Image (tube, helix red, strand yellow):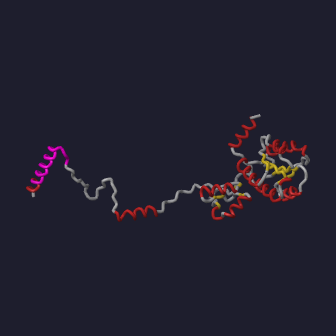
Amino acid sequence: MAGMDENLIKAITEQVIKAMAQGREIPAAINPPAGTCDGTFKPQASDAQPVAASLRDAQLPKEKSTDIPLTGIITANQLEQAVKVKGYALVAQDARLTPLANDYARLHKDKIKRANPVAGTPTSNPRKRAADSRWFWWIDGVCPVVKQVTKQRQSVMTPMANPRRPEAMLGVVRDLNSAVKSGLVAGGVLFVPSSAKIACYANRSQSLRAVVGTNIKAVEDAVSELAANVLIIEYKQHGLASVDGMLDVFLAQNPSVTTLIQRALAECHRLG
């Protein structure tokens, strides 16, 4: 055995010396010992499909949910946007839907979800709820529709004592601004034949953010984007259903203007 080993070594040595003399290398397949990883993965053809299938079908652990529910007064636009982005809208337990949002929710019941209350957390806003807010209202003239809707909401709407004449507009705005600034009321609803003058007066007041209620959608946008606290309705242009819908949206809120809007309004006031 020892002689065979010596002869084999001698033969290999001669071949190596001969190859070196000719300037070429002898390729030699060098394989690692069985059970040693060489850094490559070569699955058998029969194994490739099961591996791919198992990866595809594997149930990955779900990430911890960080989905934040919609809160406060929720508009149809907010629901629609949430459904478009996530496939569903998550709504807080104490959130309130505007009439249009309720219509949207009824049409898409499978996509609207109520968030489960978290143990140890309040189910309502710690600040004063919108339902507890008081609002002033005033009218220039007389209108049976206004009489009806304000009577139905007399628990939250208080009539202003100012005369119901055009000449009283400036005083109405001044008194409403003072009441909002002092926290006596959340805002006001002003019923007028024409909105131009009183809208201009109201939006020159630092505590008032007035919007003219042309339709329910416009009021929804004003509430969600501006936290409008004064609604001006040209009562001669609207029927009972329209006025009812706008009031439902407007009175359901608890006005809280964002820092961004506060800065923008402050800049507007500085324009002089």
In the displayed structure, 265 sits above or below 65; it is above
Please indicate whether residue 16 sits to the left or right of residue 79 in the image.
left
Q: Residue furthest left?
A: 3
State whether residue 24 appears in this view.
Answer: yes
Q: Is residue 165 above or below residue 107?
A: above
**Secondary structure that dominates the magenta span:** helix
Q: Position of residue 200 (x, y in %)?
A: 81, 42
The quarter holding residue 208 reads: top right
Q: Residue at x 43, y 61 (%)?
A: 55
Q: Nearer the viewer, residue 4 or 14?
A: 14
Residue 94 at what x, y percent from top left?
A: 69, 58
Q: Which residues are magenta?
A: 7-25
Q: Is residue 93 above or below residue 223?
A: below
How many marks do you count on the picture? 0
Please provide percent x and percent y for residue 80: 66, 57
**Closer to the camera in the image, 230 or 12:** 12
Q: Residue furthest front?
A: 22
Q: Is residue 129 visible?
A: no
Tell me the residue at 28%/58% (across/down). 35
Quadrant (top left/top right/bottom left/bottom right) for the C terminus? top right
Residue 17 part of the magenta-drawn span: yes
Query: Which x, y percent locates residue 245?
Result: 78, 57
Q: Is residue 69 left or right of residue 269?
A: left
Placement of the N terminus among the 4 image quadrants: bottom left
| Residue 177 lies within the magenta run | no
- The residue at the point 62 percent across, 59 percent down is 88
